[in-house]
């Protein structure tokens, strides 16, 4: 299973954070950053309980790997990853390692120099052949960061040390330290979204887009009677990303 949940606007959800998460939120200097953190991590908790109703959203515990990747503690069948940029938020849930990255496209002051620093030489060749530098840059960057997050190594693995092959508008792949990773990407307006996993490209990936005020339509057998979860989400459509 690999499901990606995306929203352009953070839902207004009652917080259900741990003490450690609340303390982290209080360290933000800007209110907008504090609210973003609170809503993103509340959304994450509600989603996990949406798939596994045996634990209330506020009761989930998380651990971090040596490189900082979060996971459910103790070890759980589901793995997750979270990314946000501006008002856009994406959460990926799977039963294998997964990474997700979302970025708002924007002008880069010195994009060529940055590309030389973070992209493999063959990736820079691909980039040079694309029509819009910034569109191609953020497409490729979200693919690379999603893979690094799925690996769990973060930037301890230099992004230029491996090459991503862009196979189509939606698919990419890369081999990193002997492991094969596949990426699914979407562009919508000014954002780019990529998710990476050790799946074959033909395997099913479901995409849910959240709109408006939170209500719910169940997406799995994990039905729940918890009102804080059953009022979570409304989505316009479910798409099989690999159809």
Image (cartoon, rainbow, N blue to C red):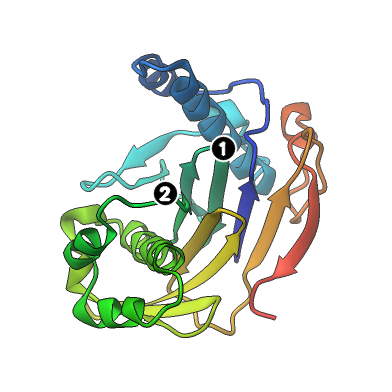
In this view, the residue in front, 96 or 81, is 81
Q: Name which residue lies at 24% across and 81% down.
A: 178
Q: Name which residue lies at 81% across and 41% down.
A: 216
- Give the number of marks: 2
Residue 87, label in figure: 1
For residue 13, side relative to residue 100 (left or right):
right
In this view, the residue in front, 178 or 109, is 109
Q: Give residue 180's quadrant in the image.
A: bottom left
User: Earlier along the polypeptide chain: callout 1 or callout 2?
Assistant: 2
Q: Quadrant of the C terminus?
A: bottom right
Q: Secondary structure at mark 2?
A: loop
How far from the left and from the top, in percent, is residue 111? 28, 59
Question: Pointer 2: residues within 10 angstroms few (<14), some, or many (20+)?
Answer: few
Q: Is residue 180 visible?
A: no
For residue 103, side relative to residue 27 (left or right):
right
For marks 1 and 2, give the one nearer the viewer.
1
Q: Which residue is mark 2?
A: 75
How far from the left and from the top, in percent, is residue 57? 60, 31
How far from the left and from the top, in percent, is residue 75? 41, 49
Relative height, residue 47 to residue 157 (above, below): above
In this view, the residue in front, 17 or 141, is 141
Q: Name which residue lies at 52% across and 71% down.
A: 184
Relative height, residue 187 to residue 123 (above, below): above
Q: Give residue 153's quadrant in the image.
A: bottom left
Alpha carbon distance from label 1 to label 2: 31 Å
How far from the left and from the top, in percent, is residue 18? 46, 22
Relative height, residue 67 to residue 30 (above, below): below
């Amino acid at each position: 299973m690999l499901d990606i949940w995306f929203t352009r606007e953070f839902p207004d959800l009652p917080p259900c954070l741990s003490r450690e998460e609340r303390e982290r939120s209080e360290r933000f200097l800007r209110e907008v950053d504090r609210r973003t953190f609170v809503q993103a991590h509340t959304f994450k908790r509600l989603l996990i309980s949406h798939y596994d109703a045996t634990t209330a959203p506020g009761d989930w515990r998380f651990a971090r790997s040596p490189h900082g990747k979060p996971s459910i503690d103790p070890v759980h069948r589901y793995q997750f990853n979270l990314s946000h940029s501006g008002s856009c938020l994406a959460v990926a849930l799977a039963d294998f390692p997964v990474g997700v990255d979302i970025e708002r496209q924007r002008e880069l002051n010195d994009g060529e120099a940055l590309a030389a620093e973070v992209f493999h030489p063959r990736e820079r060749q691909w980039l040079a052949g694309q029509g819009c530098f910034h569109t191609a840059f953020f497409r490729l960057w979200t693919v690379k960061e999603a893979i690094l997050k799925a690996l769990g190594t973060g930037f301890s693995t230099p992004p230029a040390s491996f090459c991503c092959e862009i196979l189509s508008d939606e698919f990419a792949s890369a081999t990193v330290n002997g492991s094969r990773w596949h990426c699914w990407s979407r562009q919508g307006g000014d954002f780019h979204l990529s998710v990476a996993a050790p799946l074959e490209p033909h395997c099913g990936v479901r995409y849910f887009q959240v709109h408006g005020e939170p209500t719910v339509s169940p997406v799995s057998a994990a039905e729940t009677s918890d009102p804080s979860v059953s009022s979570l989400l409304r989505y316009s459509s479910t798409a099989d990303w690999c159809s």
